Amino acid sequence: MAAVDVSELTKVFRVPEREAGLRASMRALFQRRHRDVRAVDSISFAIGGGEVVGFLGPNGAGKTTTLKMLSGLLYPTAGEARVLGFVPSRRERDFLRQITLVMGNRNQLQWDLPALDSFELNRAIYRVAREDFRRLRDELIELLDVGDLVRKPVRNLSLGERMKVEIVGSLVHRPQVLFLDEPTIGLDVTMQKRIRSFVAEYNRRYEATVLLTSHYMADVEALCRRVIVIHHGRILFDGPLTQLGSQFAGYKTIEVALANGAADLSRYGDVLERDADRVKLRVEKADASRVTALLLSEQEVIDLTIEDPPIEDVIELVFAEASE
């Protein structure tokens, strides 16, 4: 059985709207106009136990709405979702004890108390045995290296420090399914890397299922073998991350270093960058082998590398095609 199973899931919001100005405001008191916004539009996917899946899309694509439905915070308009065999919207106790939702722009810890007190509150809410709680709490504190932070009031912590203790607080009941919504948003590169390593280790130790949204492609590339791309509430792609580039990006980049300096190589492909003796070209994928052979035979090549386009560029191509 899949840990997360979604079938034709849909969420439509009824949104009031009116024109600007006093007259429109007065009219809206007696005759309100609404429009339906289809935030999630009949999406279907399944995630197996222990998988780490990236859930990608631009702002307003429907990512957070989907995670809220899967965690039971929103009731779907149509379709069906099951998480660990439970219907999320029923909010059953056994369901809530096995999942967590971490949102990078929200906090659950008590602002004026040390994080340890909030951890203890979560232990009581989830009815975790005290001995099991202490063992897991100390393990999580060690993994994220927050031993010096958990005794300080949360309001005295920096954003990165608070995010780390927030994650510990969200996992003290050892959930089997993690819904992570932008967990590294606003953090510096070092802190992002630490949280990525922690999520990977938690997944390895407890075989937890993770559905991750992030605008930082480094998060996705480090953690996810599979990605689901959503745009305007619809799924555009669901498959291996490595396949995304081959399906949507029809070009490769060739970076070449020349002994005779950065010569004019525009006849080989589109010149993207030129720096001293190095030139970066973009060529059609089908022509990459031919262009490489020509460069090696016609130029004094010191070094040459062929790469697929960055994943950020591929995702941008996906969205551009969807908009068109």
Image (cartoon, rainbow, N blue to C red):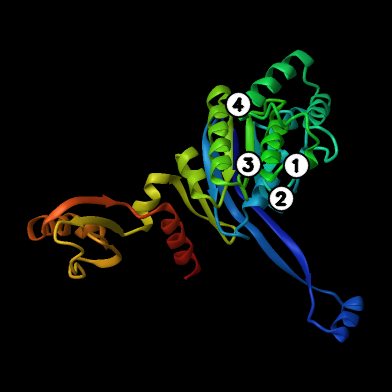
Would you call the spot at circle 3 few (<14 residues within 10 Å), some (14-19), or many (20 or more)?
Answer: many
Question: Which of the labelled discs sits on residue 76, or is there none?
Answer: 2
Q: Nearer the viewer, mark 3 or mark 1?
A: 3
Q: Secondary structure at mark 1?
A: helix
| Relative horizontal placement of residue 123, taking residue 65 as reference (left or right) | right
The disc labelled 1 sits on which kind of residue?
Ser
**CA distance for labels 3 and 1:** 18 Å
Seen at 76% across and 64% down, the residue is 14
Q: Of callouts 4 and 1, which one flags the residue occurring earlier in the amino acid sequence?
A: 1
The answer to whether the residues at label 2 and label 1 have Cβ atoms under 8 Å apart is yes
Question: Which of the labelled discs sits on residue 89, or is there none?
Answer: 1
Q: Of callouts 3 and 1, which one flags the residue occurring earlier in the amino acid sequence?
A: 1
Which quadrant of the rendered structure holds the N terminus?
Answer: top right
**CA distance for labels 3 and 4:** 18 Å
The disc labelled 2 sits on which kind of residue?
Pro
Q: Position of residue 61 (x, y in %)?
A: 60, 58
Would you call the spot at circle 1 few (<14 residues within 10 Å), some (14-19), or many (20 or more)?
Answer: some
